[in-house]
Image: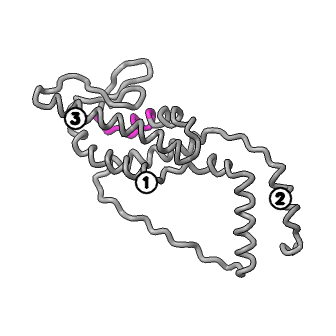
Amino acid sequence: MNIKKIPLISILFLTACVTINIYFPAAAAEKAADEIIQDIQSTEPEEPQSRLAPQSHLSEWQLSFYQQLDQVIAVFISSAHAEANLSVDSAEIRQIRASMRTRFAQLKGFYKSGVIGIKSDGLLTSKGNVSLKDRNKVKKLIKAENKDRNNLYHAIASANKHPEWAGQIKSTFAVRWVSNAQPGWWYQTSNGVWKQK
């Protein structure tokens, strides 16, 4: 079949007949949460990712046609991309992640000593046994971390043009914070019981 003979109106008609239901991309959210948490808790220096464009073997006309077709389809079914890929890259998200990564160096010792724990909602709390000299520092660290976590969830939802997903993103992260916790860290189960990993 010769692509040049396909009328553009036929392509538009076919794409217009597609009905899209937008669902929260749970699997993509879990994967994104794991990547973000592991990055925040990493002690390795960040490496810039190279983004090389793939080599194309298409003629200039074919490439132009496919690019235009992609834009037309995107207009009609742009929400399908939101299901497949959860975008976690924006200036706001990068800033929050950098702040959390910097703070993690201070939090790590308090995780290990059992001074702080991960609540069932994924936020941090003091578990007691905080020395008088560290009490104010721990309180400030927990407050800043919890603020950044909540801001991160809203930023991810906004970056995907679905602010209504913030609650589901928070729930996903709550589970993944515990899954990515290191041995010896304390976490709260959904029924309120504290356990040590």
What residue is disc 2 on?
A: 12
Q: Residue 183: image x %, image y %?
A: 30, 37
**Callout 3 environment at 10 Å: few (<14), some (14 to 19), or many (20+)?**
some
Residue in the image at 53% along x and 51% along y? 87
Q: Are marks 3 and 2 in contact (CB under 8 Å)?
A: no
Of the two numbered discs 3 and 2 on the same chain, state the one appearing first in sequence.
Answer: 2
Say left or right for 17 vs 141. Answer: right
Residue in the image at 37% along x and 24% along y? 188
Q: Quadrant of the N terminus?
A: bottom right
Residue in the image at 70% along x and 57% along y? 74
Say left or right for 7 vs 84. Answer: right
What residue is disc 1 on?
A: 91
Indicate the amino acid at tag 3. Phe
Of the two numbered discs 2 and 1 on the same chain, state the one appearing first in sequence.
Answer: 2
Cα separation between marks 1 and 3? 29 Å
**Callout 2 environment at 10 Å: few (<14), some (14 to 19), or many (20+)?**
some
Residue depth check, mark 1 versus mark 3: number of the one nearer the observer: 1
Indicate the amino acid at tag 1. Ala
Indicate the amino acid at tag 2. Leu
Q: Is residue 83 magenta?
A: no
Q: Secondary structure at mark 2?
A: helix
Closest to the observer, 107 or 31:
107
Cα separation between marks 3 and 2? 58 Å
Based on the displayed image, in which of its 4 quarters is residue 14 positioned?
Answer: bottom right
What residue is disc 3 on?
A: 110
- Please provide the residue range marked out in magenta: 174-184
Q: Is residue 153 above or below residue 84?
A: above
Closest to the observer, 71 or 138:
71
